[in-house]
C-alpha cells in the first residue's frame, strides 16, 4: 500500500557542492530525509519504470536511509532499484553502475571525506543518468521544491534484506542487491595492465594502502591483494565502519599522518596511498615524497599513455580553478585542451560527455577520468601503480624528472575550519569590495597585476557560474585564491590556495612553505584573516 504523508518544508535543504550535508541528528528530524528525497523525485521527469541506483559509504544512518529511499522509490513508480550489498557502494562504483546498466539515475548517501557517527556528518546527493552529480539546474529545482513540499509518498512495506545478493520485490518495484565490488573491479581490469602490476608485486614491490575504515577497503582488498597479489595486510583499515573507527576519513597529511610518517621512514614501502570516506579522493606518497594532488594530476596526465585504457592519448585535461597550473604545462606540451572550471565534479561532466577532456582533477585530492563521472581515489592509485610498473622508477624519481621537464608549481592549501559563518562571509565580501583597487598595489613585497572573482562560462552548454572564488594574481605568475568550502556541515571553512611557479633547476627542491612564505604573508594582509576570523594559523595545511 502506498501512503501519502502530509509534511511541512524545511528551509535549509539547499544542496552544496555535492549534495545536501548536515549532522546526523539534523537528518533524523521528522520527515527531513523524506522531504528531500521526495523533492528529488518531484524535480525529475520520465523515470516511471526505470532503474534507480542506491548506495552509500556505510557511515552511520546509511542503512536506515537506504530503506526509506527504496520504499519511496517504489511509491514513486521506479521499475527497479539496484543497491550494493550491505548498503555499500563507493561513489565511483555507483557512477559506474549507473552508466553500465543504463540507470535513470542514482541516490548516493555520503558526506564524502567528513567524519561519521551518531553526531557526525551525513549526506544525500542525486546523480544523473551520465553517472555524474546532478547539474545546477536540477539541484536548483530540488531546492525550490523543498521549500514548498506539502506531502510525500512511501510504500508501506518491511525492510529489504540488504545483506543477501539477489532480486526481491518491493511492491511493484524489483530490488536487486548486487556485489558492490565486482563491476568496478572489472572496469579497472579494462583500464590498467593487471599482468604487469601482478609481475611488479611478484618481484617484491611493496605498498601500504590506508582505506581509513571507509568504503574503499573492500575494493582495495579485492583488487590489490586478491587480483594483483599484493601481500596480505597491504590494505590497512579495510573494513568500512559506521564511524570510520573514530578517525577523520580525509586523506590529507593531518588525518593520514601515520601513513606519511611511515613513508618518510627508513622502513618505508615502495609506495603509499589512502582514500577517503566514499572512495572518491586519494592521497599519494612515494618513498620519501608527498605528491600534492595538483602535481599528481599533472604527472598522471603526462604518463597516462602508459596504461592500456589511455594508450591512444588524452582529448584534454580539466582542472578546478583552485588547482595549480601544473597540468596546464602538460596540456600545452601534448597539444591538447586545458579547461579551468569551478570546484565541484559536476562541472567536469559536460566536458567529459562532450569528449573534450579525458582526465580531470581537483586540488582537494580528487582525480578521475572519463571511465566514470565522479572522481575516483582507487583509480588514481592504480594509474600511479601502472606508471611505476611501466617506467620501473620510484615515485620520487618520476616527480623530480617531471619538475625538471615542466618546472615546479609550489603549492599549498590552508584550511581554516569551523569558523564563524558571518565572519567568513564578511571576509569574502570585504575582499570583493577591494577587487577594483588591488591591481597595481604592492603587498608583502609583491606586486598585484590582476584580481577578480572567478566566473565560468561552460563551453558545452553556455551556462554560467559566478562567485566561484577570489583570485589575486601577482607579477611572475604567482597567485593566492580565497574560497569558502561547500562541503562542510558546521560553521564555515575558508580555503586559501597559494601558488608559485619555479623553473630554475637550482630551485626545484625547496621546502614548500618556505618557498611560499611571502605569498602566505600577502594572503594574510590582503584578506585580514586573523583579524576577521580570530585564527592566527590554519587548522590544516596541505
Image (tube, grey):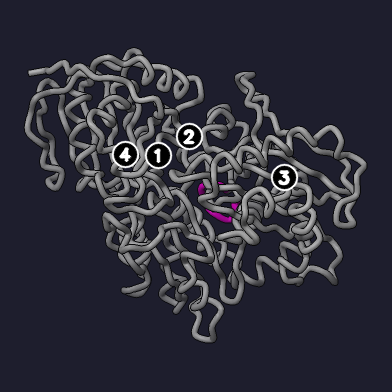
Mark with earlier residue (2, 4): 2
Measure the C-alpha gap from mark 2 to mark 1.
7 Å
Does the magenta segment cover residue 223? no
Q: Which residue is mark 3?
A: 331
Asked whether the beta carbons under mark 2 and mark 1 sit within 8 Å of each other, the answer is yes
Mark with earlier residue (1, 3): 1
Foreground label between 2 and 3: 2
Residue 415 shows in this picture: yes
Q: In this image, 385 relative to 61: left or right? A: right
Judge by depth and name the residue closer to the eye, 541 or 127.
541
The magenta segment is 303-310
Judge by depth and name the residue closer to the eye, 225 or 284.
284
Report the label total: 4
Query: Within 10 angstroms of label 3, few (less than 14), some, or many (20 or more) residues?
Result: many
Q: Which residue is mark 1?
A: 21
Q: Could you tell me which secondary element the residue under label 4 belongs to?
A: helix
Task: Specify the quadrant of the image occupied by residue 5.
Answer: top left
Query: How far from the left and from the top, in percent, is residue 263?
Result: 52, 76
Asked whether the beta carbons under mark 2 and mark 3 sit within 8 Å of each other, the answer is no
Foreground label between 4 and 3: 4
Q: Could you tell me which secondary element the residue under label 2 belongs to?
A: loop
Q: Could you tell me which secondary element the residue under label 3 belongs to?
A: helix
Q: Which residue is mark 2?
A: 16
Does the magenta segment cover residue 305? yes
Measure the C-alpha gap from mark 4 to mark 1.
9 Å
> Which disc, if any, is residue 26?
4
Q: Residue visible at 38% across and 43% down?
A: 91
**On the rendered image, what quadrant is the C terminus found in?**
bottom right
Judge by depth and name the residue closer to the eye, 134 or 301.
134
Query: Within 10 angstroms of label 2, few (less than 14), some, or many (20 or more) residues?
Result: some
Amino acid at each position: 500500500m502506498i501512503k501519502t504523508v502530509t509534511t511541512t518544508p524545511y528551509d535549509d535543504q539547499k544542496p552544496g557542492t555535492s549534495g545536501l550535508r548536515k549532522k546526523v541528528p539534523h537528518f533524523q528530524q521528522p520527515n527531513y530525509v523524506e522531504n528531500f528525497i521526495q523533492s528529488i523525485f518531484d524535480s525529475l521527469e520520465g523515470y516511471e519504470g526505470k532503474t534507480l541506483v542506491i548506495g552509500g559509504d556505510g557511515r552511520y544512518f546509511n542503512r536506515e536511509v537506504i530503506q526509506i529511499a527504496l520504499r519511496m522509490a517504489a511509491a514513486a513508480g521506479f521499475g527497479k532499484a539496484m543497491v550494493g550489498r550491505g548498503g555499500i557502494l563507493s561513489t565511483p562504483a555507483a557512477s559506474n553502475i549507473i552508466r553500465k546498466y543504463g540507470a535513470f539515475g542514482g541516490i548516493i548517501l555520503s558526506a564524502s571525506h567528513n567524519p561519521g557517527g551518531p553526531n557526525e556528518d551525513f549526506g544525500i546527493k542525486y546523480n544523473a543518468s551520465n553517472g555524474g552529480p546532478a547539474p545546477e539546474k536540477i539541484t536548483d529545482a530540488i531546492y525550490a521544491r523543498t521549500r514548498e513540499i506539502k506531502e510525500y509518498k512511501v510504500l508501506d512495506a518491511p525492510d529489504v534484506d540488504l545483506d543477501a545478493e539477489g532480486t526481491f520485490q518491493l511492491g511493484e518495484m524489483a530490488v536487486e542487491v548486487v556485489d558492490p565490488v565486482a563491476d568496478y573491479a572489472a572496469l579497472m581490469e579494462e583500464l590498467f595492465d593487471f599482468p604487469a602490476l601482478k609481475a611488479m608485486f611478484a618481484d617484491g614491490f611493496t605498498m601500504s594502502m590506508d582505506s581509513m575504515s571507509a568504503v574503499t577497503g573492500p575494493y582495495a582488498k579485492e583488487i590489490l591483494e586478491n587480483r594483483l597479489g599484493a601481500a596480505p595486510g597491504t590494505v590497512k583499515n579495510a573494513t568500512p565502519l559506521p564511524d570510520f573507527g573514530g578517525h577523520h576519513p580525509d586523506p590529507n597529511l593531518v588525518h593520514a599522518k601515520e601513513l606519511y610518517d611511515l613513508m618518510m621512514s627508513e622502513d618505508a614501502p615502495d609506495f603509499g596511498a589512502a582514500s577517503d570516506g566514499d572512495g572518491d579522493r586519494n592521497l599519494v606518497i612515494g618513498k620519501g615524497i608527498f605528491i600534492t594532488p595538483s602535481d599528481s594530476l599533472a604527472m598522471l596526465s603526462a604518463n597516462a599513455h602508459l596504461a592500456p585504457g589511455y594508450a591512444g592519448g588524452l582529448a584534454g585535461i580539466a582542472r578546478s580553478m583552485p588547482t595549480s597550473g601544473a597540468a596546464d604545462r602538460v596540456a600545452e606540451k601534448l597539444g591538447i585542451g586545458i579547461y579551468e572550471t569551478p570546484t565541484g565534479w559536476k562541472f567536469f561532466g559536460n566536458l567529459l560527455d562532450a569528449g573534450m577532456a579525458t582526465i580531470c582533477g581537483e586540488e582537494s585530492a580528487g582525480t578521475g577520468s572519463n571511465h566514470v563521472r565522479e572522481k575516483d581515489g582507487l583509480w588514481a592509485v592504480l594509474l600511479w601503480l601502472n606508471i611505476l610498473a611501466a617506467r620501473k622508477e620510484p615515485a620520487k624519481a618520476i616527480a623530480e624528472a617531471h619538475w625538471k621537464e615542466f618546472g615546479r608549481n609550489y603549492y599549498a592549501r590552508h584550511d581554516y575550519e569551523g569558523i564563524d559563518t558571518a565572519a567568513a562571509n564578511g571576509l569574502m565580501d570585504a575582499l570583493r569590495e577591494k577587487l577594483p583597487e588591488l591591481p597595481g598595489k604592492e603587498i608583502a613585497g609583491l606586486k598585484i597585476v590582476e584580481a577578480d572573482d572567478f566566473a565560468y562560462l561552460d563551453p558545452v552548454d553556455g551556462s554560467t557560474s559566478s562567485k566561484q572564488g577570489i583570485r589575486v594574481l601577482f607579477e611572475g605568475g604567482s597567485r593566492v585564491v580565497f574560497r569558502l568550502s561547500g562541503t562542510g556541515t558546521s560553521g564555515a571553512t575558508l580555503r586559501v590556495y597559494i601558488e608559485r611557479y619555479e623553473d630554475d633547476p637550482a630551485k626545484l627542491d625547496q621546502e614548500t612553505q618556505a618557498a611560499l612564505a611571502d605569498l602566505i604573508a600577502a594572503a594574510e594582509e590582503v584578506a585580514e584573516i586573523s583579524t576577521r576570523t580570530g585564527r592566527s594559523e590554519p587548522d590544516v595545511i596541505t
